[in-house]
Amino acid sequence: MTRAAADVTEPKKTKPETHTALVRRARKIYRELGDVYPHAKCELDFETPFQLLTAVILSAQSTDVGVNKVTPALFAKYPTAADLAAADPEELEALIKPTGFYHNKAKSLLGMSKTVVADFGGEVPGRLEKLVKLPGVGRKTANVVLGDAFGVPGITVDTHFGRLVRRFGWTHLEDPVKVEHAIGELFPRKDWTRLSHRIIYHGRRVCFAQRPACAACPIAGLCPSRGVGEQNPVKAAALLKYKPGEGGLPL
């Protein structure tokens, strides 16, 4: 063997992560995100299941901050499902216009509220199979309402959640329902709602779709995708949308 040949280093072969190792790593990320965001919760303002359901429908293609600016006046004018069901469409659209796509959202809100009144006596149902039958309500919306208004554990697969769990290597699936079930198998059911909040917080504050702040990420050492984003610590810190050490509160 020549010296040149002897100097060649064989690339190290990375062993595939076992399911047990994946579960351990996933749960460690969950715990560490809990330390970073101890007060992670739904960032939509609401007092009743009906208000939360309304706010989640409005949040499509909008921000929670934007929705929270609209809902005080909306809830004051239409405090119950019966009130919203009887709303004038043009007046409703004028109130929700800042959230975008207001024609479609008004249609969904009117359909949802009318169905709640007609089929559920004006009370938002607390079961997944009933919620998803309401106009404008899919599994994601239903799981938010169940978890935050009824205390029923659920996994909310929004764009942030789907992006992060794939970056974490927890799943390679794209379909939201399949992602929900795959991630649900990694965690106890009691943790599902808190898990959703922590992941979504992290997606909004650190692990952005474009240029994630990898060098300032508190869980970078556990993430197989830590090289996809900003690697300069100073530049990464400047990207953060929260102040480290202050409970994950947004800037």
Image (cartoon, helix red, strand yellow):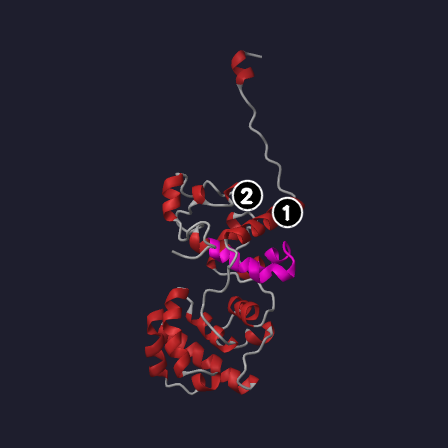
Compare marks 2 and 1 and give the one earlier in the sequence: 1
Q: What span is colored magenta in the figure?
A: 180-202
Is 139 placed above or below 119 here? above
Q: Quadrant of residue 66?
A: bottom left
Extreme residue toward the front, this view: 246
In the image, 134 versus 149, the foreground residue is 149
Label 1 secondary element: helix
Name the image quarter holding the C terminus: bottom left
Q: Within 10 angstroms of label 2, few (less than 14), some, or many (20 or more) residues? A: some
- Camera-side residue of 65 and 126: 65
The residue where tag 2 is placed is 222
User: Residue at coordinates 58% horizontally, 64% vertically from top-left?
Assistant: 154
Compared across the picture, whether 161 is left or right of 209 comes to: right
Q: In this view, does 157 lie above or below 95?
A: above
| Residue 194 horizontal/vertical position (percent) | 56, 60
**Residue 55: image location, x then y, percent:** 44, 72
Disc 1 target residue: 24
What residue is rendered at 48% in x and 82% in y? Answer: 113
Rounded to the nearest whole Å, what is the CA distance between mark 2 and mark 1? 11 Å
For residue 213: magenta? no
Work out which quarter of the rendered image holds the N terminus and state it: top right
Q: Residue at x 56, y 16 (%)?
A: 6
Report x, y in % for residue 43.
46, 64
